[in-house]
Amino acid sequence: MPKILLVSDNKKQIELISQVLAKTSIAVITSSDEEAILNYVEKNLISMIIIDEEVKKPDAIILCKKLRAFNIKDNIAIISVIEPDTDNVELLKLTNAYITKPINEKVLSAAVSTNLKLKKAIDTLSTNNSELAKSLYQLDVLYNTSTQLAGSLDKQKLINIMIDGLEKSLSFSLSSTLVFNDEHNVDLIINSLYGISPRLEHSLKLRAILSYRALFDQKRIPYDINIKDIKVTKNIKHPLEEYDLNILKFDNLFAPINVGEKFFGLIEVFRETDFSQEDTTCFQTLARQVSLPLENASLYEEIKKTNTKLEKLERLKSEFISIVSHELRTPLTAIKNSLEICLSGKAGEVSLIMDKFLNMAKRNVTRLSGIINDLLDLSKVEAGKMDFKFEKANINTPVEFIKNTFENLAKEKNITLELEKDDNLELTYYDNQRIEQVMSNLISNAIKFTNENGKIVIRTEKITSDSIDKSKLSTTDNTVFYNNYIKISVQDNGIGIAQEDQNKVFDQFQQIENSLNRKNGGTGLGLPIAKQLIEAHRGFIWVDSVPNSGTTFSFVVPVLSEKEKFIIDLEKETAKAKACNQSLLLVLIKENKNHVPSFIDDVNEGKITIMRKTANTKEAYFNEKQDKYLAVMIPEADKFAQSFIEKKIDSTVMSFNNNQTEEKYDILYSSTTYPQGGADAKELFEFVEKSLDKDIKENDFAEV
């Protein structure tokens, strides 16, 4: 029943209004006490106020102004009763409607009814808007939470994201989340607005266990746990106040947390105010929403564990191969030396039959030594322990040397071995020993699989990256292609390789024969080793073959500029720094190429010393457009070393300039340390390059 507050001290008027409204089932409360009136409004005990203009106490205008503070919040209509000829404009502005005296019963009833209906409509609209806003907010929380859940593979973080989403959308008083990481690792995560008493904590643990067991009813439970097995993690917002057992009487929501078809945990939330149906839907949605990310996290953990095991097995395999190979090398060397002594006749006369068997033993010892060397090389390459000595030279030199080495072997099978070389090849960086190793492998394979009276052609030529057929490369993901390359190919007219086998030739322990025939022997490691050696040169290797017509193995090595070679070296040192959790200093100095005197030339010639060089220090001098550069990297150098070198450059240049009347050094320099300046070599070098082009006043470099 609606209640109307009548503010008047006119008894006849009070009686009339009460009688009229009594007929419409509306209760009338009369009061002229300001404190009582405001109390009614504050507690929302009334639906409307009728105020007499002539009420003496309280003052009608002052009262209406005070009521306006509540009017906006609670939509309480105010109707004033006024004289027909009133000039009280201020009162009319403060009220929603008015009735003139003498009061007409029908007008009074209509005014009250209309304003009550209006209030009801406004209340309904306000409620709907509030519920809509709440629903939109919960949807926004669900969306943001799902986005966060999709971005993590950490189980603990996923649970925290879910709880945070529930707290935002439901404003719970307390949440209790039981999580089974495994049989021996069970957590109870309690998020509470206030602190919790010891007996409440005990009760929540017991409640979680009982709820867990109830989920499986007659079925076999995954883990049998008791209270002692549960580790409690508490996140308390306001620890000065405390919840006790009475919180268990609050309204609550409960849901299991599953990972696929497996049970992972459960969650229960408590709130002093009742949960709505929308709250329940939101709660269940979030509890289900975390399921897929948890499943992905579990799979990720399994993959990590599997990878760790595989890495351990791979490391053990490499160590085993390395140890066994080294252990075999010593007795093989002794056997080989003994056989050579016997064959030389120094140990006694050698008959024809003895000579035959001794030479057979020597050939097999040599073959076994080759297999052991392949295994050792493979283990070194896989472990990243293969040493490379890159020097700038003409790659025709090792190619021609290996061609000459194999000429006699080719003649034994009447195979023609030709070299078509480009005498105008640019110098490039390569490891002479490793290129010889690759060429030896390719040429020996060509001789092995080419029939008598066959032909093998070795070619060297310069090509661009556009000339490389990327489809023939084993992988081009995240691969850097340089502008120019030197291509070396070994072409034979031998037995060829079947199309389906061409993708396997660079796999370990694969024979490049078109059948299971093992008459040619070998470990199948030569080509995989060659592939990794060429890739260490930032090159590529591939094969073209037609069965019974011949095979061509080709590889390319990039023609690197000084800058490109320096960045490659920087990548290696950055990788070492990352693995060892160390720093690295990079310094870049720039000056005009035609400037005299040249600071960079003086450093290069040793006239100026700006840093103490170590065995690991690497530097490069290169030109770009009208400028020349000096780049230096120093492993294990930190911010202190950076500051010291910068001050050394400044003092050296300033000292020189102060002693000269006309000629002065004119340089820019920039420096950075890993990892502050970037996560990899590319970012580090880009940082120092960009710094050189920025305003001197805004960056950590100097112009002198």
Image (cartoon, helix red, strand yellow):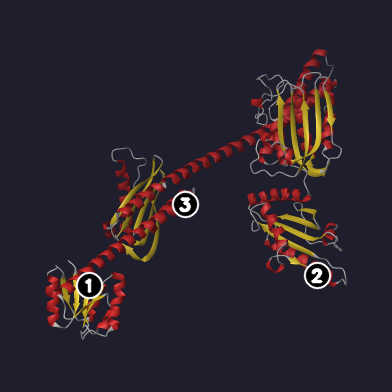
**Disc 2 designates what residue?**
654
Is the residue marked by circle 1 packed among few (<14), some (14-19), or many (20+) residues within 10 Å? many
Regarding mark 2 in the picture, which secondary structure is present there?
A: helix
Q: Nearer the viewer, residue 190 or 696?
A: 696
Is the residue marked by circle 2 packed among few (<14), some (14-19), or many (20+) residues within 10 Å? some
Asked if residue 197 can be seen in this view, the reply is no
**Percent coordinates x, y for residue 316 in the rendering:** 61, 36
Q: Nearer the viewer, residue 422 or 533?
A: 422
Could you tell me if the residues under marks 1 and 2 are in contact, i.e. CB atoms within 8 Å? no
**Percent coordinates x, y for residue 569 in the rendering:** 73, 49
Could you tell me if the residues under marks 3 and 1 are in contact, i.e. CB atoms within 8 Å? no
Q: Nearer the viewer, residue 143 or 656?
A: 143
> Closer to us: mark 3 or mark 2?
3
Mark closer to the chain start, 3 or 2: 3
**Which residue sits at x=12%, y=71%?**
22
**Disc 3 designates what residue?**
147
Circle 3: residue type: Thr
**Disc 1 designates what residue?**
48
